[in-house]
Amino acid sequence: MKELFTETSQYRNWFYSKEKLQEIREKNHVSAVERVKQRVLEEAELQKLVSAKSTPTRGEQPERVNSPRLNPSEIEYLKMEDELALCNYYQTQIPLVDSKFPEEIQKNKFTDKVKASAITYVKRFYLRNTMMDYHPRDIMITCLFLAAKTEFSFVPIEDFIKFLTTKATKEVFFDLELIVARSLRYEFTVHHPYLSAYGLFLDMQTALKDAKKIQAIYEKSKEYIHKSLFTDTMFLYQPSQIALATVRIAAKELNFDLNSYFRIKFNSEPKGKLDNLYKILDEIEKIIKEYEPTPLNKAKEIDARLHKCKNPEKNPNSAISRKRKLEREGLEDADHHKKKRIEDEYQKSLEEVFK
């Protein structure tokens, strides 16, 4: 009989080996840098064309491009490690964002599950996108807004704009919501270790007698689950394995021996299977204990470099954006004229019939 987790979209589409996860990130980054480089070169050429235009005649407004002048040879593009570090920093800000909201919203809307889903959405989004296209600050807010909806804790976007004092409009966030949803393949359900940890908490009470200690272990394990959210464990291990690893870490810290529980639960399992489980738990424990959040000064340094290598195509005031807009309008006009011509021909054919 298959494990239930293997039947989920999370297992099918968001579960990888370490090697595969690294490969996906490297391919995405190489592709993104090459694409952004092409857009930067195009923007620089268009800026030269605008600058080379003759001085406007009297009363005529000069053509302006409200975007930074680009010198492609001077731009330093973010490395994959830079994007991962900055992504991690903004993930750690998600649990802090709720402090900006009224206490009622903090308690009733931004639950652990909502924040965990938002963090997971950010991780998944940047497996297929780059910060040079979409800044993590806006994506972080969008993912929290989306997670609140998908976890049935809806908070209006107007509240996000009001309490987070963001410059972006609700229309911007609605557009980003669709972009994020597409990147997630519209797979919004996230299986967190929290539920598995609670199941372990209940099960341990049937096998062990020290209820007070079990409660303390459970509460402590949630701290380590929270920490695990900022690592790659959700891509590499099953939620039940992460939960069991955090319970074991908490038990060690509280000087409680869980071996008796393991013996009761896995007594009928082959020794090789139990040894493999211990190996997995050791790997998860190592990842969680070695995790260090990106410090603010490093995040600021990367963010400053990001500002200089953003994709100009995403700036509505850039020359390339204006060109794309004119191209779209030209296609729309051509389509309109084509439809009008077809309609005129149709009406003419009717007139011929009823002469």
Image (cartoon, helix red, strand yellow):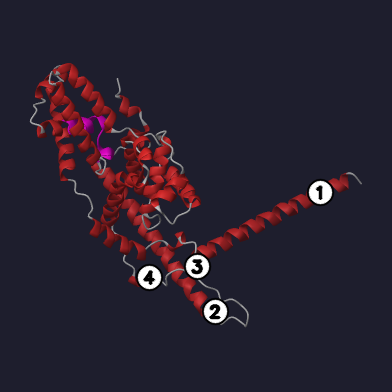
Q: Position of residue 214 (x, y in %)?
A: 16, 25
The reply to whether callout 1 and callout 4 are in contact (CB within 8 Å) is no
Q: What is the secondary structure assignment of the residue under circle 4?
A: helix
- Residue type at the position of mark 2: Lys
Which residue is at the front of the view, 248 or 311?
248
Badge nearest the viewer, 3 or 1: 3
Q: Position of residue 81 (x, y in %)?
A: 26, 55
Which label's residue is closer to the chain start, 4 or 3? 4
Residue 53, labelled with which disc?
Answer: 2
Give the CA separation, mark 2 to mark 1: 45 Å
Which residue is at the front of the view, 185 or 288?
288
Residue 319, labelled with which disc?
Answer: 3
Give the CA separation, mark 4 to mark 2: 21 Å
Residue 72, labelled with which disc?
Answer: 4
Give the CA separation, mark 1 to mark 4: 54 Å
Q: What is the secondary structure assignment of the residue under circle 2?
A: loop
Residue topped by disc 1: 347
